[in-house]
Amino acid sequence: MMAQYLDIKAQYPEALLFYRMGDFYELFFEDAVAAAEALDIALTKRGKHLNADIPMCGVPHHASEGYLLTLIRKGFRVAVCEQMESPAEAKKRGSKSVVKRDVVRLVTPGTLTEDSLLEARRHNFLAAFAKIRDASALAWVDISTGDLSVSTLPLVLLG
């Protein structure tokens, strides 16, 4: 299981890895230390790696959105790694098989679009900029209200 965690974590080194284990998302190593401090939750340990204790913390799956929001507001990026099969399905593949997991969501302060993580009483903008030949365009939407705006400008005016 820890080998799988380390393989997935290597793909997202800039993010905290919320690693689904049953009814919890668990974090290990440096991610656990950072998350435990940011979330004010207990830091514990789980097994050993290279003869050293592995720091660990976790949050319940059913309450994960609140913890995610706290981490995002504190500037963290979070990769959410889900179980892609049940333990029974993994067991059918072989007695030592680890449950398949994969990152299904990368949450950052700049990519929040989930209603549960947005502040409904504030504007929440998403913008896109494009250059096409000698013109530019900017489109922006307030994803809280659905208001959409578009503006164009010749590139020469941008300098």
Image: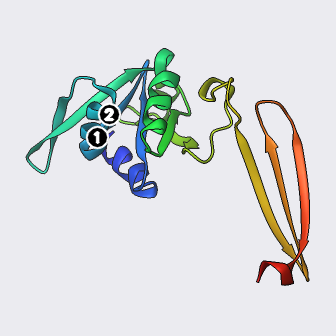
Q: Would residue 140 appear left or right of 13 to someone viewing this image?
A: right
Image quadrant holding the N terminus, namely top left
Q: Please name whichever residue, 35 or 151, is drawn nearer the observer in this view of the structure.
A: 151
72 up-or-down from 58: above or below: below
In the depicted structure, whether residue 76 falls above or below residue 90: below
- Neighbor class of circle 1 (other Cα within 10 Å; few <14, some 14-19, many 20+) is some
The image position of residue 128, as x and y in percent, is: 78, 58
Where residue 34 is drawn, which disc sits there? 1
Asked whether disc 1 touches disc 2, contact meaning CB atoms under 8 Å apart, the reply is yes
Residue corresponding to mark 2: 38
- Within 10 Å of disc 2 (Cα), the crowding (few <14, some 14-19, many 20+) is some
Q: Quadrant of the C terminus?
A: bottom right
Count of labels in the image: 2
Residue 29, quarter of the rendered image: top left
Q: CA distance from mark 1 to mark 2?
A: 6 Å
Asked if residue 110 is positioned above or below residue 57 in the image, the reply reads below
Is 79 situated left or right of 137 in this image? Answer: left
- The residue lying at 49 percent from left, 43 percent from top is 79
Nearest-to-viewer mark from 1 and 2: 2
